[in-house]
Image (cartoon, grey):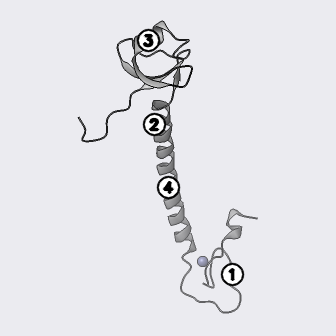
Amino acid sequence: MSELGDLKGCTDGGCIIKKPKGMHTNGGCRCAREIQRAGEVGRKELMKLQMQEKRIAALESAHRWVPVSERLPSKFDKVLSCNTHGVVETKMGNRMHENPDVYPYWMPIPPPPEGVK
Ligand SMILES: [Zn+2]
């Protein structure tokens, strides 16, 4: 069975997909063109989807808690820290360098909302 098996085809007597039963038109089969068009639309949508997936992955990796065992922030950057009790505060990065057991996670502080200085 070809991959076109589920396609209905058109009512043209010379349809390349499925020969219509009973009454049929003779308007010329447009199925090949339609399939090609669908393929182009599909490819564009797939590319869009792949770009969105990359963007989501980049956003997720930029906005996740980084374990200090994986990477430490710069000592001189203010970051969001999460201590062992789950308390989230802004701290200078050097606190994670000095007390990695107290502040096991950190992440960059997100930028302020647009228009706020
Ligand atoms: Zn057709």
Q: CA distance from mark 3 to mark 2?
A: 25 Å
Q: Amino acid at mark 2?
A: Leu
Which residue is tagged 3?
95
Q: Secondary structure at mark 4?
A: helix
Q: Are marks 3 and 4 in contact (CB under 8 Å)?
A: no
The quadrant of the picture occupied by the N terminus is: bottom right
Q: Earlier in the sequence, mark 3 or mark 2?
A: 2
What residue is at 52 percent from the left and 11 percent from the top? 100
What residue is at 47 percent from the left and 55 percent from the top? 44
Which residue is tagged 4?
45
Measured along the vertical axis of the image, is residue 17 above or below residue 114?
below
Direction from residue 83 to residue 19 in the image, left or right: right
Marking on residue 59: 2
Which residue is tagged 1?
19
Determine the residue located farthest toward the bottom in the rendered image. Answer: 23
The quadrant of the picture occupied by the C terminus is: top left
Q: Amino acid at mark 1?
A: Lys
Q: Kindly report which numbered mark, 1 or 2, lies closer to the viewer in this rendering.
A: 2
Q: Kindly report which numbered mark, 3 or 4, lies closer to the viewer in this rendering.
A: 3
Q: Earlier in the sequence, mark 4 or mark 2?
A: 4
Q: CA distance from mark 1 to mark 3?
A: 75 Å
Q: Amino acid at mark 3?
A: Arg
Residue 11 x, y percent position in the rendering:
61, 84
